[in-house]
Amino acid sequence: MEMIWALLSQSGGTQGGTPLGLTLAILAAAIATFFGGLGSAIGVGLAGRTATGVLAEDPDKFGRLFLLVALPGTQGFYGFIGGLLIILKVGIFGTLKPVTTMQGLQLFFAALPVALGGLFSAIHQGKVCASGVEMSAKQPEASMKAVIYGAMVETYAVLGLLGTLFLLQGIRI
């Protein structure tokens, strides 16, 4: 514990950065991107597996099912946006800004809403959309109702992205 506290106390002022600060900033961008993408991959996989079964019986339903399968993929984009904004804040594409340890920690915690919100909402959205695919197989005219239910889960991914955006605005680097 003393070693961790010593690393944190080396954060310096706003003028000088630390290797740990930059590492935490890069980790924040990676976490936002990775967990959003992981949740989307799982969610799209859940809905896609169900849709593939339906399409084996009736290939003409592809158009109706496509949106339900694609919907859980948006969280991956939200995570990518969150990660990109963190990278831009640190200046990795241009002049690298010095990041203190405390600023790195702030960036890390700012990435959590989009990362965890994206992970869990995409998985649950995939489950809702898979059920919507099953409903659309039996009642094709009700497929848009299933999309609405899936979009309701999407709301929480958007809130996670907004939380990350607002938190990033408060971090001065």
Image: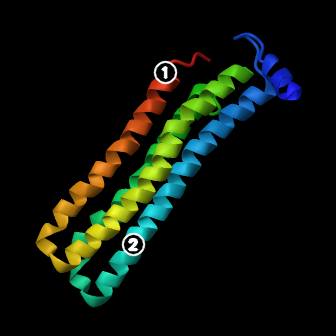
Helix or strand or loop: what does disc 1 sit on?
helix
Q: Residue at x 30, y 69 (%)?
A: 131
- Looking at the image, residue 66 sits to the left or right of residue 34; the answer is left
Is residue 44 depicted above or below 3 in this figure? Answer: below
Please provide percent x and percent y for residue 109.
Answer: 59, 31
Residue 82 or 42: which is nearer the viewer?
42
| Residue placed most toward the observer, 16 or 155 | 155
Which amino acid lies under the numbered mark 2 shown in the image of this protein? Gly
**Tag 2 residue:** 48
Residue picked out by circle 1: 169
Residue 93 drawn at (x, y percent): 62, 33
Give x and y (percent) for residue 114. 48, 40
Tell me which label, 1 or 2, sits earlier in the chain: 2
Q: Quadrant of the N terminus?
A: top right
Residue furthest to the left in view is 141
Say if mark 1 contacts mark 2, CB within 8 Å. Answer: no
